[in-house]
Image (tube, rainbow, N blue to C red):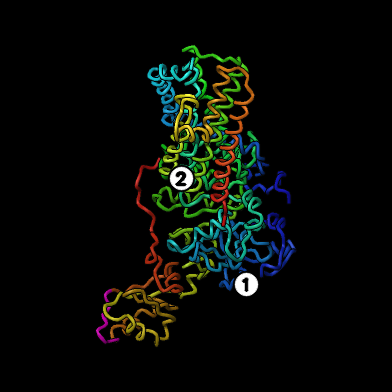
């Protein structure tokens, strides 16, 4: 994020952040900031990408105690989150965790049942039209009209945002390169492949040059090649244009690869938030993972007394020991498990670095896949055009 | 901050230059929706062709089979008597409600709701397209009438008013399928709204004049608004300028429109409600 972009944003203090209006201080600020004092986030350091954590700008997306219920079901239960301008925020969680509901509230499709939220400085409940002018949205299912051509859809989208004919044609020319659909853009959408539909959906979200882009599971169901194209585009939009991106996903790799910060949601609650690195570090430098036969609680009791072991998580027959130094710790861990007795037997033992799935396990007690998420992208189901 | 003025929203894409999002305004939203709907019509010929075939079929069958019966009931020109019936058959129930349900189920309706467009324009734009379509469907039926010798005693102006009344009736009826489409989002429910067509179209003076009807059918026909729409249309063909049937026809159309459009806009309100 460049200094001149930072300089034109409002400085506020009521978001629980340190206030600072001096542009020089902004430019001189180092790469590491303490963020989210109000949210209780871990210390976050920033490297690379178009995003640089800001402690002095009003958040581009802000939710405070956000709730949404459907009948008696509380789908979103008091979410607090803050996304800075120019940031890619990954919202990670299993199916039914509340990701899409939060997105639909932030995009003004549904109103919050409690708490408040603002996007681009406007309250989603009281000023939904102002929010709509400033956001682009690609929902989970590509929202397209199969009977129109891609070009017709893009032009119509331009009309809805009050763009002049010349502006619409200019954007259409830009977006043609972006979505790389070629002459098929003149064909009816019904003839498009899944990947083409996703890319057209993304282009529709960008026609009016939005400040904030919401992507609700943009790569779900896509083959790896199409998924990589979407990732590249998200990175480009963020790095080159400084666009704030709010991305929901159930793919661990996607959140890890793309997001400056990740919020993990489970059962409608934000259970962890921070940079992917900070989140992973928060559960230990390394993990020793043992697949055991017998009672895993015996393994826990055997491992916890070890000085090298910081924490032990159990998921079924999988016992995960967080350790500060894996190569040094693996031998004592193996020995302790072998000597645990009570019929405990180790089937597999491995050493690896933590993943976001381990973070999810640590904060929820279950693997994300166990909650119904497809943690790996789909294999190709149709020809990529 | 005003919601109707163009507000500068910082451009992010250097290629986008001064491209700024703004409220397009109600008129542009309305025409955008209508243009899209009209563009779709020739791409769905299966939705329009029956509306052309059915009235022609009934006109030919009714004239061929009931002319003598009608003559005995005092109808001197049964072709002119039947032409408005063909028009009613052509335009009643014609709407973009099925396409609207597809939009809801395909998620495109949500995409429209994500834009700052006027919510009433979502429905009114479709109705504008419906009006254009029902006028277009009426013209071939009128040409058929002209071919078999049905003329207008009220001249060109009467012909234009005839088309306007037919279009207004078609528009008045569209509220029912739209209400069902928006309330249920269910294509089967929308298709079943066609059932409403039968009592409106048949329990009336479609085949014989009011005086020739007896019993319960006479009573129902008295309260069926289509009776008065048919009377207004027939008056323009054979009766000359008669204010009473024309006024009654307009009142019947307005009454049906008031009910159906109230239901439709209530359903729209529920569909776009964020609660």
Q: Examine the rendering and report whether any part of residue B274 can be seen.
A: yes
Helix, strand or loop at mark 2: helix
Residue mark closest to the camera, 1 vs 2: 2
Quadrant assignment, res A61:
bottom right
Majority SS type along the magenta span: loop
Q: Examine the rendering and report whether any part of residue A173 can be seen.
A: no
Query: Is residue A52 shown above or below A298?
Result: above
Q: Report in which chain the residue with disc 2 lies.
A: B
Q: How many marks?
A: 2
Residues indicated by labels 1 and 2 sit on the same polypeptide chain: no
Q: Which residues are magenta?
A: A340-347
Residue B249 position within the rendered picture, expressed as x and y whole percent measured from the top left: 58, 29
Residue A233 position within the rendered picture, expressed as x and y whole percent measured from the top left: 51, 49
Query: Is residue A160 shown above or below A86?
Result: above
Q: Nearer the viewer, residue B31 or B160?
A: B160
Mark pair 1, 2: CA separation: 40 Å
- Say which residue appears at 69% left-offset and 68% top-offset: A14
Task: Using residue A5 as the reference point, say whether residue B267 is left or right of it.
Answer: left
Taking the magenta stretch, the answer to whether it contains residue B77 is: no
Circle on res. A38: 1
Task: Using residue A377 as the reference point, say whether residue B253 is left or right of it.
Answer: right
Query: Where does the C terminus of chain A fall, quadrant-wise?
Result: top left
Residue A116 position within the rendered picture, expressed as x and y whole percent measured from the top left: 62, 63
Q: Which residue is mark 2?
A: B106
Circle on res. B233: none
Query: Where does the N terminus of chain A fall, quadrant-wise?
Result: bottom right
Taking the magenta stretch, the answer to whether it contains residue A344 is: yes
């Amino acid at each position: 994020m460049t200094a001149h972009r930072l300089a034109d944003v409002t400085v506020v203090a009521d978001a629980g952040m340190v206030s600072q209006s001096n542009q020089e201080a902004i430019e001189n600020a180092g790469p590491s900031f303490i963020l989210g004092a109000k949210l209780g986030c871990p210390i976050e350091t920033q490297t690379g990408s178009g995003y640089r954590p800001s402690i002095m700008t009003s958040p581009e997306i802000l939710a405070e105690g956000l709730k949404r219920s459907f009948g008696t079901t509380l789908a979103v239960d008091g979410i607090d989150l803050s996304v800075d301008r120019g940031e890619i925020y990954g919202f990670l969680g299993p199916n039914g965790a509340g990701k899409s509901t939060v997105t639909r509230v932030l995009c003004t499709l549904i109103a919050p049942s409690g708490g408040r939220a603002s996007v681009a400085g406007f309250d989603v409940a009281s000023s939904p039209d102002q929010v709509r002018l400033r956001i682009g949205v690609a929902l989970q299912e590509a929202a397209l009209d199969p009977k129109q051509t891609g070009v017709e859809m893009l032009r119509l989208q331009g009309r809805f945002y009050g763009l002049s004919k010349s502006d619409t044609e200019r954007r259409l020319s830009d977006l043609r390169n972006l979505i790389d659909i070629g002459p098929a853009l003149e064909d009816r959408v019904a003839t498009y492949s899944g990947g083409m539909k996703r890319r057209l959906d993304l282009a529709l979200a960008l026609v009016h040059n939005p400040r904030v882009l919401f992507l609700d599971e943009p790569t779900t169901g896509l083959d790896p090649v199409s998924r990589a194209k979407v990732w590249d585009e998200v990175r480009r939009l963020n790095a080159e244009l400084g666009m704030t991106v709010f991305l929901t996903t159930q793919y661990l790799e996607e959140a890890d690869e793309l997001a400056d910060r990740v919020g993990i949601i489970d059962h409608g609650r934000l259970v962890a938030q921070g940079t992917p690195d900070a989140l992973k570090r928060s559960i230990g430098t390394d993990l020793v993972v043992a697949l055991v036969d017998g009672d895993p609680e015996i393994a826990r009791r055997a491992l916890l007394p070890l000085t090298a072991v910081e924490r032990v998580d159990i998921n079924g027959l999988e016992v995960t020991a967080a350790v500060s130094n894996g190569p040094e710790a693996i031998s004592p861990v193996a020995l302790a498990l072998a000597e645990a007795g009570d019929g405990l037997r180790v089937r597999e033992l491995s050493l690896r670095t933590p993943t976001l799935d381990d973070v999810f396990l640590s904060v929820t007690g279950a693997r994300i896949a166990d909650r119904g998420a497809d943690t790996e992208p789909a294999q190709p189901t149709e020809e990529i055009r | 901050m005003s919601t109707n003025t163009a507000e500068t929203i910082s451009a992010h894409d250097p290629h986008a230059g001064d491209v700024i999002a703004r409220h397009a305004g109600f008129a542009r939203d309305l025409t955008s929706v209508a243009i899209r709907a009209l563009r779709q019509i020739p791409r769905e010929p299966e939705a329009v062709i029956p509306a052309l075939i059915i009235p022609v079929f009934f006109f030919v069958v009714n004239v061929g089979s009931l002319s003598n019966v009608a003559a005995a009931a005092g109808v001197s020109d049964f072709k002119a008597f039947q032409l408005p019936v063909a028009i009613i058959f052509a335009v009643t129930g014609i709407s973009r409600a099925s396409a609207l349900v597809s939009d809801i189920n395909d998620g495109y309706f949500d995409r429209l709701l994500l834009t700052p467009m006027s919510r009433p324009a979502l429905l009114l734009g479709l109705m504008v397209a419906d009006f254009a379509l029902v006028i277009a469907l009426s013209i071939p039926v009128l040409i058929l009438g002209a071919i078999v010798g049905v003329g207008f005693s009220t001249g060109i102006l009467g012909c234009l008013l005839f088309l306007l009344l037919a279009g207004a009736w078609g528009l008045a009826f569209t509220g029912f399928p739209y209400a069902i489409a928006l309330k249920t989002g269910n294509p089967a429910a929308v298709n079943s709204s066609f059932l409403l067509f039968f009592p409106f179209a048949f329990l009336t003076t479609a085949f014989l004049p009011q005086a020739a009807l007896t019993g319960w059918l006479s009573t129902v026909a008295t309260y069926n608004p289509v009776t008065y729409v048919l009377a207004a249309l027939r008056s323009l063909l054979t009766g000359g300028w008669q204010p009473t049937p024309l006024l009654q026809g307009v009142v019947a159309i307005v009454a049906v429109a008031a009910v159906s459009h109230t239901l439709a806009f209530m359903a729209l309100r529920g569909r776009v409600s964020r609660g």
